[in-house]
Image (cartoon, rainbow, N blue to C red):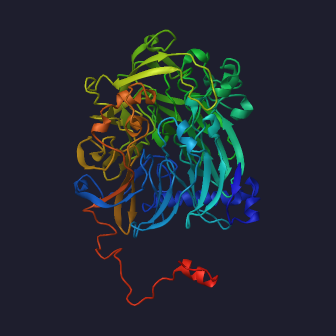
Amino acid sequence: MMKYLSTVSGAALLCTVLTGSMLSASANEKLVELAKDPANWVMTGRDYNAQNFSEMTTINKENVKNLRSAWSFSTGVLHGHEGTPLVVDGMMYVHTPFPNTTFALSLDEPGKIVWQNKPRQDPTARAVACCDVVNRGLAYWPGDDSVGPLVFRTQLDGKIVAMDAKTGVTRWELENSDIKVGSTLTIAPYIMKDIVVVGSSGAELGVRGYVTGYNVKTGEQLWRSYATGPDEEVRLGANFNDANPQYGQKGLGTKTWEGDAWKIGGGTNWGWYAYDPDVDLFYYGSGNPAPWNETMRPGDNKWTMTIWGRDPDDGMAAFGYQKTPHDEWDYAGVNVMMLSEQEDKEGKMRKLLTHPDRNGIVYTLDRTNGDLVSADKIDDTVNWVTQVDLKTGLPQRDPEFGTRMDHTARDICPSAMGYHNQGHDSFDPARKLFYMGINHICMDWEPFMLPYRAGQFFVGATLNMYPGPKGDRQNYLGLGQVKAYDAIKGDFKWEVMERFAAWGGTLATAGGVMFYGTLDGFIKARDSDTGELLWKYKLPSGVIGHPMTYEHNGVQYVAIYYGVGGWPGVGLVFDLADPTAGLGAVGAFKELANYTQMGGGVMVFSLNGEGPYSDLEKGEYQPTIGSPPPANKGNRAALETGQDPS
C-alpha cells in the first residue's frame, strides 16, 4: 500500500538510488554536523554512535542541585511515552503513543504549538499490540536541494509516514506492516544517507521479523531483510561471517527450523539502531523466536536473537552473531547498540559495539567483523547461563532453568522482561563507562501447546514474575538497578538499587552527571563517578523514556517524557489484576499503581528554571483595541445565497 500526499516533484518521485547517491553523502554529513552542535538532539542516541552522551558542562556535579522546571508540555495522550523528543534548529519535535500524534514546538515560545499532525488509524491495531501502545520516537532528515527537511514517524497500524519538518504536512505514507497478521510498528525510524530504515513488531503473534530500507524522498522500498528463511531473503552477503564461521554461515535460516516453522518464527526488531559511516554498516538486534514454547520449534532458530551488521544501501549482512540459540525465555535481543573506540585488554585500539541484552549478558563485539570481545553478566544473579564461550560465542546453559514441556521452571533469572529491555543507555567516552538502567526480575515458567492463528497471540507459556534475589520479594519492590559498567575490565564501578525497573534508559554528560527516569515518576541525577544521588524531581507520571539535553540561547536544558506504561505498566494502564496477565508483568509490578498514575508529556529543566518564560511578558496576550469584529462566515454565506441566516 502506498499513498502519495505530497507536493514532491515528479522528478523526485522517480529518484533512484544511483541518481541520489551524489546527494546521500551530503545529507549524511548534514546529520553528522547537526549532531555535533549542542543545540540539537537530531536522532535517538544523539548521534550515530548512539552514546546518549553530551559534551556540555554547564550543568555539572556542583550545580545540578539547582535544576528547576523551566517549562512543560502535555501531549494530551495517556499510556507509555518511550524514547525522547528531537531538537533541531530551535524546534522540538514531540511524539506520542497511539494515536501517534506529532507536535512541533518552537523553543523560543514552547507554549504555542507550531504544527501538529494527527493521523487517523485503524483502532484494531490496539488489540494486537503486545505490550501497551507505545512508540519509541521520530527521525529527522535534513533535506537537500530538491526536497526540504522531513520528520518521520511510525504508527501502531503499521504505517511509516514522512512529514514536512516546517509545516507538518504529510508528504507520503505507506504500509510497512500488516496488522491483520499482528504486525505493528513501535520502533523509531532511523536515517542513514537518503535511506530511512524501519523494523517490525509482533513476534508474540507469530510475525516473521524483517527490517526495511526506504528512499526518504519517495517512500520507494529499496530492500527488505528477514530474520528467518532462505539466505536470499535474509540477505546474507557473499562473505557473511567469514571472520567468524563458528557463528554459522549459509542455509541456516531454514535448516535450524523444523519444516516451515520459520515462516511464523518471530525475530522482529523493534529496538534501536547505531551506524558507523566509516565502516558503512548499521547495527541492530533481532528479537525472540515464536512461539515462546521451545518444544514447538526444535533447532537453533536462526537468525532470531542476533546482533546484525548490515550495509544500509542494500541491506546485505556482513555478520550476524546469535546470542541465545534456541531461546527458551523470550530474551528478545533488540536492545540498544552503543558504539565506542577503545583499547581492548591487549592494548589494541578497536571499533567496538556494546549491547546489554535481555538475557542478562552485556556483549561487546568488534563492529568491523563481529568478533566477540567480551560477554559479561549484567548481574551476578543471572542463572540460566554459567558463562559464554568467547571462542564459539555459545552460552553454556544451566539445565535446571530450562523450560521443557510438562515442567514448571522456577526462579529463572532474568525473567522474560530481561535484566535489560528497551531502555536506551549511555556511554561516557572520557570515563569509559556505560550507564545502564537495569531490571531485577526473575520468573517461573510453565509452557503449553497452542495452534498458530494469524493475528492472534502465539506464545504458549504462563509466567509469574517477581523481584530478583537482591530485591524485596515479599513486598514486590527492588525491581531495578542502575549500574556503571567498564566493558574492557568487565566490572562495575558502582551500582544502586531502585524500587522499580529503570526501564527507560540513561543520559551521560561531560559535566560528570548522569540522568535517568524511574517508573514511580522521578527524574534523577547521579554522580557519574560514584553513583551518589545529587538531585531528583517528582514528575506527574512514571517514566519509560530516556532523558536528553540541548542548548538554546546559551542555556542548557534537560528534557524527559513522563507517562507510565509499556510492558511494566500494562496492569496499571489496562486495569488488570491477574498476576500472569500482561505476559507476567502484572504480578511483577503489582505495587506500581500505588506510586504513580497515567499521564503524558514532556518536562524540561534548567539551572534555576531559567527559560523562555523567565521574561514574564513572554507569550502574554496583547489586546488590539478597536479592531473590527470577525465576520460571521455562516451568516454571510446564507445572506449571499438568499437564505435565512437563522
Image quadrant in which you'd find residue 500: top left
Query: Seen from this angle, which residue lies furthest top?
Result: 406
- x, y (%) of residue 71? 33, 62
Residue 611 appears left or right of 103: left
Residue 559, image x, y percentages? 37, 55
Between 252 and 614, the one nearer to me in the picture:
614
What residue sits 40% from the left and 47% below the top? Answer: 546
Choose between 233 and 113: the one closer to the eye: 113
384 vs 37, nearest the viewer = 384
Where is 401 relative to 538, above or below? Answer: above
In the drawing, does residue 1 fall left or right of residue 296?
A: right
Residue 265: where, in percent of width, then height? Answer: 62, 26
Q: Is residue 355 above or below residue 138?
A: above
What is the total number of numbered labels drawn onto the structure image?
Answer: 0
Drawn side of residue 501 relative to residue 272, left or right:
left
Residue 187 placement (x, y as % from top left): 54, 44
- 52 in relation to 252, above or below: below
Q: Image quarter for residue 31?
A: bottom right
Of residue 589 and residue 373, the one placed in the foreground of this image is: 589
> Is 224 located above or below residue 86 in the figure?
above
Q: Would residue 316 be visible to someone looking at this image?
A: no
Q: Quadrant of residue 209?
A: top right
Residue 403 in view: yes
